[in-house]
Image (spheres, rainbow, N blue to C red):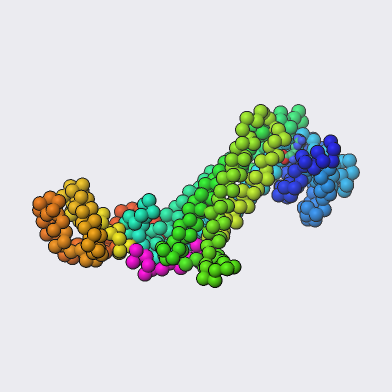
Amino acid sequence: MTSDAASYTSSLEFDPRIFSADVKCNRAHTTMLQEEGIISQETAHAITGSLDELEEKGISALDLDPSVEDIHMAVENYVTSRIGEKAGFMHTAKSRNDQVATDLRISLKEEIEEIMGDLLNFIQNTVDMAEENLETVMVGYTHLQHAQPTTFAHHLLSYAQALKRDYQRLGDAYKRVDLCPLGAAALTTTSFPINRQRTAQLLGFSHVLENSLDAVSSRDFITETVSALAIMGVNLSRICEELIIWSTYEFGLVEIGDEYSSTSSIMPQKKNPDVAEVARAKAISLQGELVTILSVTKALPQSYNRDLQEVTPHLWRAVDTARDTLNLVAEMLASVKFNHQRGLELASSNFSTATELADLMVRENQLPFRVAHQIVGRLVSTALEEGLNPDLIDSQFIDQISQEVTGEALHIKEELVEKALNPLEVVKSREVPGGPAPTMVREGILNLKNWMEKQIRS
Ligand code: ARG
């Protein structure tokens, strides 16, 4: 190979990610070879001794010249430099094909565990914030139009639920990452009497991969993990999008902490939500990594192909982007100050309580909901034409409209009308599981806390 071709095909640039896993993998394999009587105790000790030494010194002890091709060769070269040609026994019944797949799985398991821990912290922050905002009224949107009153707490718990599913998705992917390919060797195992269960156990895997061709050639454990990360990115980008919109002058609902905003170099009045914007864009690069991985692996024949090496940098980029985005969005959300007055103002000023008024007619006058809907629809358009705010709607006005629509007055008690038009009262009345009533949100918080405790204990 020319030196250009060698550096073009080398994986050394991103192999440092699997250095520590590679040392562990070599050590477990050597231990098993010795336990099964495939190599002598003396050779095994010499090999594991120099691996221990390498682990202590760290990756800087390796010669990472591109001509070395990859980290597996660099580690073997190191052991050879310490104990001579005995080092060659380390590669008995092993190939770089099963080794790289094993290393990737060992490293990815650690990364997933960390991201899952970060997700729990994010959920905890969200729950803490929700606890302080049980009666913080705001308007809920559909089609980005005022729909019905809700609370900031209820809204925050919607984030928490999405993050909980992200956590569960990663946990599911983890189960399929946690399978050991070692012993598959190049593709068809070996004629040496190796013990695959033992290396899997030494490396902390739950099971071995059952087919050796599959063991060296499958990367769907990566696709699945990156897919879970890309979905998480979508959830995070939606939070960012809302914070960007809510922090505009027009909405005026939140203020993002200065630490997560910037100003303009020319417009001194500006406060820009930079972290939210960059995070919104980073979510898209996660989708890009996923599509690249799907495309590299599509239509590859069994078993190992060097194309698979090209998957790896996209995996690590996805892992890093996902984790950084997750943690920064969590911090930024925690820095948010919600404008209570503005929340109430928006929920009170544009008939977001209209559904409740129609429900009241169904309850008090036994009207079919469709008729009530018609009356309230007419009521709102008349009020808007006449410039009447919701707080000026009374029983008499309702009767005027209902007579126009149905020919009959409804005579609803004034206090019931007032209650139906009060956003906080409306929120409190939605005492259905999953609803915004503080009692229900408190229950949602409790469920999440119990669930989180279970995750921490397991
Ligand atoms: N560096 C390779 C990878 O990341 C592993 C080595 C397999 N190389 C080979 N020529 N069989 O996939």
Q: Could you tell me residue 196's position as x and y percent?
A: 69, 36
| 154 relative position to 60: left or right | left
Q: Position of residue 416 (x, y in %)?
A: 19, 62
> Which quadrant of the rendered structure holds the N terminus?
top right
Q: Is residue 342 magenta?
A: yes
**Res 88 seen here:** yes
Ligand 1 is located in which of the four quadrants?
top right
Question: Residue at the spot x=61%, y=44% of the render?
Answer: 289
Closer to us: 387 or 73:
387
Q: Is residue 365 left or right of residue 99?
A: left
Residue 187 at x, y percent in the picture: 71, 30
Q: Nearer the viewer, residue 343 or 425?
A: 343
Q: Please tell me whether residue 381 belongs to the stretch shown in magenta.
A: no
**In-front residue for pair 210/44:** 210
- Residue depicted at 37% across the width and 67% down the height: 342
Give the image location of residue 197, x and y in percent: 67, 37
**Location of residue 336 with respect to 176 vertically, above or below:** below
Q: What residue appears at the point 34 percent right and 56 percent down from the top-left corner?
A: 146
| Relative to 330, 98 lies left or right | right
Which range is magenta? 331-346
Q: Is residue 194 visible?
A: no
Q: Is residue 61 left or right of residue 237?
A: right
Residue occupying the point 77% across, 41% down: 8
* Quadrant of res 132: bottom left
Toward the right, the furthest residue is 84
